[in-house]
Amino acid sequence: MNLAEIIKESFSLKEAEQKDDIVLNSIEEWDSMSHMLFITRVEENYEIEFTGNDILSMQTIGDIKNVLIANGKTV
Amino acid sequence: MKIAETKILITGGASGLGRALAIHLSDKAMAVIIVDRNKEQLEQLSQEYPAIKCYHADLTNYDEVEKFVADVFNEYGKLNVLVNNAGIIHSEPLVNILKKDDARHSLENWKKVIDINLNAVFYVTVSVAEKMVKSRSKGVIINISSISSYGNAGQSAYSATKAALNALTVTWSKELGMFGIRSVAIAPGFIDTPSTRAALTEAKIKEYKNATPIGRMGKMEELYHSVSFIIENDFYNGTILNLDGGLKL
């Protein structure tokens, strides 16, 4: 599962609507628990463990991509 | 998770069950840290068992908890196991008809038990869990509940706090499981300790033994075994482990 598919599954946000500047907590389906579940899904799918600072920095879809790319992942 | 690779914090570890558990684990774990509000008992334990690191704090004071937890993480880097053991037993009927002037359960006692047995557990756990999540430390929170958590006559406050711990155990297992932090409670029945024998008359002990299908009180070794099992079984989560010989109050 790629990032777009995880976002779609976690927040019911269609891939066409997933712009880099979208702030996650502005998505209607978002809440703090769904956010944490989303983070762990990304970790599982990309076989990565984010640091606490990584998690705090991931506010937008673009932020998440940047963190994944910085960790050598393709998004 | 192997016990030898864990750093363990035990609250209320200067006396009773917490002390015994700390001593038992002190030569097995990477580090055993205790916190207690009784300075004399802390000093005594520290002298007898230098391997156990002792901290003093009043766990009902949120600011003190924050400070001591920060100190622990500064010194040890991370924690893997938190044993929420600190608590008090309080027995008092909801209405005591033998008291003419004020038959009601003391409000002061109610608040005191809630503060020590429930609020303090929340203060410690929220401080420790935040640091575990942010440092991505995996581990387990063990709440010492009680057979009274299912309701025991004469223990409104105590039973309520232990039932709350059971609920928090399940809640935290669901919230923190995704970070590799498990949450489990142990609900002991009557364990044969000096404090149990001091608290109960011989007649009462006999009564409980007779009511227990297995016909005796639990042994400390059986409690140690439960704690070890919980630490070492990484799939054991969100569960209340009843350690009561089959006794139902």
Image (cartoon, grey):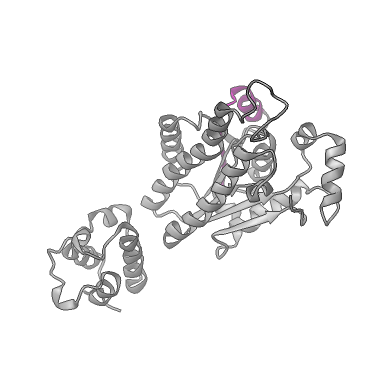
Residue A45 to residue B162: above or below: below
Q: Looking at the image, which residue sits at the far top?
A: B101
Q: How many marks?
A: 0
- The foreground one among B100 and A68 is B100
Question: In the image, B180: left or right of B185?
Answer: left
Residue B103 to residue A25: above or below: above
The stretch drawn in magenta includes residue B161: no
> x, y (%) of residue B41?
64, 26
Q: Quadrant of the N terminus of chain B?
A: bottom right
> x, y (%) of residue A66?
19, 64
User: Which residue is at 34% across, 60% downward?
Assistant: A36
> x, y (%) of residue B224?
70, 50
**Residue interval drawn in magenta:** B30-47
Question: In the image, B200: left or right of A17?
Answer: right
User: Which residue is at 82% across, 46% downward?
Assistant: B208
User: Which residue is at 46% across, 38% downward?
Assistant: B72
Q: Quadrant of residue B233?
A: bottom right
Q: Quadrant of residue A58?
A: bottom left
Question: In the image, B67: left or right of B116?
Answer: left
User: Which residue is at 86% across, 49% downward?
Assistant: B210
> x, y (%) of residue B60?
49, 31
Residue B1 seen from this side: no
Residue A14 seen from this side: yes
Question: In the image, A3: left or right of A16?
Answer: right
- The foreground one among B201 and A34 is B201
